[in-house]
Image (cartoon, rainbow, N blue to C red):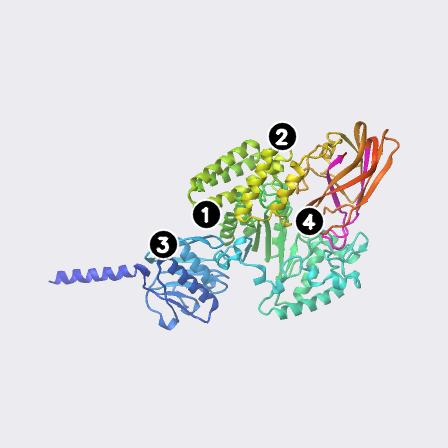
Amino acid sequence: MKSKIKLILLLLTCVSQLSYSQIVLVKGSKPKAQIVVDENDSIDMKAALLLQTFAKKITGAELNIVAPEKKKKGDVLIGNFQLPVSGLNTSDIKEDGFYLSSNDAYLRIVGTSGKGSVYGVVTLLEDYFGVHYYAADTYSLDKSTDMIVPRNITKLDNPSFRYRQTQSYSFKDPLYKLWHRLEEPNSVFAGDLWVHTFNAILPAAVYGEKHPEYYALINGKRRPGAAAQWCLTNPEVFDIVVQRLDSIFKANSGKNMISVSQNDSQNHCECDKCKAIDEYEGSPSGSIIYFLNKLAKRFPDKEFSTLAYLYSVAPPKHMKPLPNVNIMLCDIDCYREVTLTENKSGQEFMKNMEGWSKISNNIFVWDYGINFDNYISPFPNFFILQPNMKLFKQNGVNMHFSQIASIKGGDFSELRSYVVSKLLWNVDIDVDAVIHSFLKGYYGNAAPYLYKYLVLQEGALLGSRIPLWIYDTPVTHKNGMLSKTLLKRYNELFDEAEQAVAGNVILLNRVRQSRLPIQFAELEIARTEPITEPEVLKKKVVLFRQKAEELGVVHLNERNNTIEAYCNLYVDRNLVKRPKNIAQGMEVTYLSSPNPPYDKIAAKALTDGLYGGASFNESWVGWNGKDAEFVIDLKELHQLNGIDVDFLHNLGAWILLPKGVSCEVSADNVTFRPMGAVSIPESREYQVKFVTVPIKWSAPTEARYVKIKVATIGLCPPWHYGVGNPAWFFIDEVAVY
């Protein structure tokens, strides 16, 4: 009898221990636990509602949300009300970090500051219940009648960077941004002032005319304008800025950070006082830090972010930023085909980053994983993301913005945003595993073929040793990763991927969207060679336009040029039969040489019969701040009626339309006769465009030599980014009729 009693007691003990070996939230689609939270804490309530929502999506059961005084064993406790917790030192939890535990009779989620409790719930759902958020309103989960959490979970998780920002069209879904633990500037920076803020704080439209001395002295003249920098040693500028910032902070209570940063241009003040500081410090960042330190002293309880960008990327030699000065360091000039330690541009940036890290513990890195000129173009940089982020963290970077081509239709934009978000939280993740998981979850059975595509293209880029640039074009890579042989193989892989998901329209469309960059690359490369089958190429244009429209992919680049407009221009410029161009294939003699490096193709580019695209670094011949003059030899006398000259307009690249074009003709290359001149109106259009300038004469004229003169506007105007600096103009094709 005694032995039977002992056995029963032992069994009861085992059952009791088993019941505490796991925490049952839902069993048989019936709620078994409550979510306990302090309803006065908005972040913890958000975490509770998130768990409640997904518990219902997974099981159909709704967990009750109750106040702390109603807690019972087996409940989920969210928030700081449960502190202290045995074995937890809350000082170990950093901003946005969290503690997740099932060590006792409760499932505990604690986040002491920021959104930690929300991110704890996200981790619980991802790691234990198979919820993965891929894009806007697009997630996967494992449906079940049960939600059971294993015992002995102990996880303390802090982010690699205290501020994490990237880009994604999926931000239209607020839950996507929250799920991926991302910030946006307007949630942190007062007045939504976060970069290029000089003109917003001290508008040239308000102060420029009466006080040009507030603005940069450039090439001997004060040049106020929307893109002009400040004269940072002018005491009146400091006083006005102090007043403006004081009012902005008062209007944005609770936000203690603001950006006071250079406009998006290359100019800076060359007055004696600014120049003296910059020369002593060995960098134009000297006068910037001088000014920011004064602000930091004036507002010791506020944080001021400023750019180290373009001309100011090198740190000062002697001056140190105060602790409440945040350095937003930008690697915009670096190539992207290898990591930052592996090419010259990256090594120069690393030298500057290491210099800043020696004098500041408050560094924000803005990294560019984007092709501004061609969002919808292959950009295989996944393999450099993690090594570069690790370098940032090793150098004390605590805030990070990874700018990527995340518009709908951008090169694997959903995968890119997903991987970057994971790395922003934890630079030590297994990136390959994350990519495999995403591809399988988002593309289904097409995943293996898309993975092969990514790996093949990455290897082809490395093998080509051709730089990958943020203003790149597929044409650059037509003898490398986008060769005819490789394009054929890429298309084969996409054919296999489409076939693998042919029965699922949603997955098929995702694959087709990811194929758009290859279709775009084929079109761009095709126009750089003589077009022998225009009807075949026209069908490819129609297919590209059709697929983009069906998939809701609209924009092509940073300048908001549309795919529809691109396709129309492509046909008009490349596939419409034109009148015979007498100048095609003829020799060009330059009386005013183009500027390097855009002179390399000058011998043939203007008369090769091939029209340049929207990217200035292929097919175009450029002059910087000077007039162009050249003569085309037609080899024999012809009856001529006029000319067309093709120009590129791209404000972001400082490529503006010239002042005008004139034409002269000659029979002997000695005596020239003026045939006409055309003034070209100024254009401030944001979009990239092509402008054909015709000069027609009243009657046919016999000539062999055609001289064309193009008058520059000289310096970039006050409204432009390059104010006070020489403007570029670019020519591709010249037609003579």
> Label for residue 182?
none
Quick one: 78 or 662, which is closer to the camera?
662
In what quadrant of the picture does the C terminus appear? top right
Residue with the mark numbered 1: 506
Q: Give the residue at mark 2.
A: 532
Near-viewer residue (336 or 112): 336
Outermost left residue: 1
- Name the amino acid, label 2: Thr
The amino acid sitting under disc 1 is: Ile
- Magenta part of the chain: 706-735
Residue 164 coordinates in the image, percent (x, y)? 54, 56
CA gap, disc 4 and disc 2 = 34 Å
3D distance between C-alphas at marks 4 and 1: 37 Å
Q: Position of residue 485 (x, y in %)?
A: 54, 31
Q: CA distance from mark 3 to mark 4?
A: 49 Å
Helix, strand or loop under label 2 = loop
Q: Quadrant of residue 460?
A: top right
Callout 2 crowding tier (Cα within 10 Å): few <14, some 14–19, many ≥20: few
For the residues carrying marks 4 and 2, which lies nearer the camera in this image? Answer: 2
Marks 3 and 4 close (CB-CB < 8 Å): no
The amino acid type found where label 4 is placed reads Gly
Dot 3 lies on which element? Answer: loop
Question: Which residue is tagged 3?
Answer: 143
Contact between marks 4 and 2 (CB within 8 A): the answer is no
User: Residue farthest to the right?
Assistant: 671
What is the three-letter code of the residue carrying label 3? Lys
Quadrant that contains the N terminus: bottom left
Asked if disc 4 and disc 1 are in contact, CB closer than 8 Å, the reply is no
Which class describes the residues within 10 Å of circle 3: few (<14), some (14-19), or many (20+)?
some
Q: Mark 4 = which residue?
A: 652
